[in-house]
Image (cartoon, helix red, strand yellow):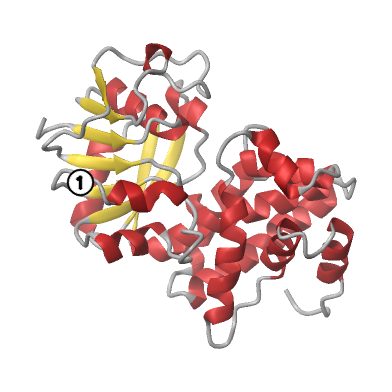
């Protein structure tokens, strides 16, 4: 299948991408560690139907035109160690590897350098699977590769924009999950809509500072991979990170809150990893919201203590 799309990972997002690509008329192979879901559909996509044109398999094809890697961030290293086809890789996960604090593209380049891009944006899997309108960005330094990916994956309903700033795109995709936890805590703790708006707005400024300090662009954070993703993740009921924050703000321990989600919650791993990256910089990048979330998740602070730490920061110009 040298002219088709390989999607690695049959979670909700990988399955949704496979359905979307098949709907667009592309030949699709969906690699699944467990291809035995009823009808081939991940249970987190209720009501979705897997097109008959998709080949679901636990064996990787020898060739593909493009590989969409849609595994959870903490499983990405193992996925990259597999015998993937010699084709451009599009990284479709968000976050950082917990053990190394590497972003997806950094991890890929350390293991198997080659043509690669990042696909990120404000996308709930169940809506993409349903064919509802959505937009995302394809980020990489190579304009020809951006156009190649956009041509293979983009459609009128799933509109893709190119970005030459993969660093900013990855920072936005990872950090928005952390800010969403804080937004959920604010609502469940009874702090109100004003407080959530403040968390999201100051979180956006924090993401911009960190992106720029790491070599990205502040302007990228104002787009789909930053502001757009924040709007969705900090308010949408389907957001696992927001729901985790709601549980913690309602009194659950971080461990109990994570168990209640019963799925990967990338913000829990991203918060300490992002904080570590920020503190390695010279000078360190100020990330007070991320620091507060990381402290709460590590049980180093209560919600009340974390709130007090943020409110105690000195007044300054915006």
Q: Is residue 187 visible?
A: yes
Task: Work out whether residue 310 or residue 228 is closer to the camera in this orientation and state it.
Answer: 310
x, y percent for residue 117: 30, 54
Regarding residue 133, the answer to whether it shows in the image is: no
Image quarter of the N terminus = top left
Q: Is residue 26 above or below residue 244?
A: above
The quadrant of the picture occupied by the C terminus is bottom right
Give x and y (percent) for residue 64: 15, 37
Q: From the viewer's perspective, is residue 192 above or below residue 310? A: above
For this view, does 244 lie left or right of residue 142?
A: right
The quarter of the displayed image where residue 293 is located: bottom right
Residue extending farthest to the bottom is 282
Residue drawn at point x = 54 percent, y = 87 percent: 282
Q: Say whether residue 87 is left or right of residue 292.
A: left
Which residue is at the front of the view, 209 or 99? 99
Where does residue 35 sit, x and y in percent of width and height? Answer: 34, 22
From the viewer's perspective, is 54 left or right of 105? left
Q: Residue at x 64, y 66 (%)?
A: 205
Residue, disc 1: 148
192 relative position to 202: left or right: right
Circle 1 SS class: helix
Seen at 73% across and 53% down, the residue is: 182
**Residue at image location 70% in from the left, 55% down from the top:** 200
Disc 1 crowd rating (10 Å Cα; few below 14, some 14-19, many 20+) is some
* On screen, residue 289 above or below 70: below
The answer to which quarter of the image holds residue 154 is top left
């Amino acid at each position: 299948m040298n002219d088709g799309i390989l999607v690695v990972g049959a979670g909700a997002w990988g399955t949704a991408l496979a359905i979307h690509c098949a709907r667009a008329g592309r030949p699709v192979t969906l690699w699944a560690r467990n291809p035995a879901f009823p009808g081939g559909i991940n249970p987190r996509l209720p009501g979705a139907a897997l097109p008959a044109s998709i080949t679901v398999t636990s064996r990787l094809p020898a060739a593909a035109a493009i590989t969409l890697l849609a595994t959870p961030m903490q499983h990405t290293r193992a996925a990259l160690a597999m015998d993937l086809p010699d084709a451009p890789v599009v990284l479709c996960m968000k976050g950082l590897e917990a053990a190394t604090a590497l972003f997806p593209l950094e991890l890929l380049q350390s293991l198997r350098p080659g043509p690669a891009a990042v696909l990120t944006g404000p996308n709930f899997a169940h809506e993409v699977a349903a064919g509802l309108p959505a937009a995302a960005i394809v980020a990489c330094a190579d304009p020809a590769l951006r156009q190649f990916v956009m041509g293979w994956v983009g459609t009128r309903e799933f509109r893709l924009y190119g970005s030459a700033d993969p660093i900013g795109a990855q920072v936005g995709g990872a950090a928005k999950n952390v800010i969403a936890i804080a937004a959920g805590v604010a609502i469940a703790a009874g702090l109100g809509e004003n407080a959530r708006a403040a968390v999201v707005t100051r979180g956006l400024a924090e993401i911009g500072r960190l992106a720029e300090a790491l070599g990205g662009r502040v302007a990228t954070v104002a787009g789909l991979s930053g502001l757009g993703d924040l709007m969705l993740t900090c308010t949408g009921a389907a957001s696992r990170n927001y729901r985790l924050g709601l549980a913690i703000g309602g009194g659950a321990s971080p461990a109990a809150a994570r168990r209640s989600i019963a799925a990967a919650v990338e913000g829990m791993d991203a918060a300490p990893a992002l904080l570590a990256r920020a503190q390695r910089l010279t000078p360190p990048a100020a990330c007070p919201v991320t620091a507060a979330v990381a402290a709460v998740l590590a049980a180093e602070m209560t919600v009340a203590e974390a709130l007090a730490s943020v409110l105690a920061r000195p007044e300054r110009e915006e």
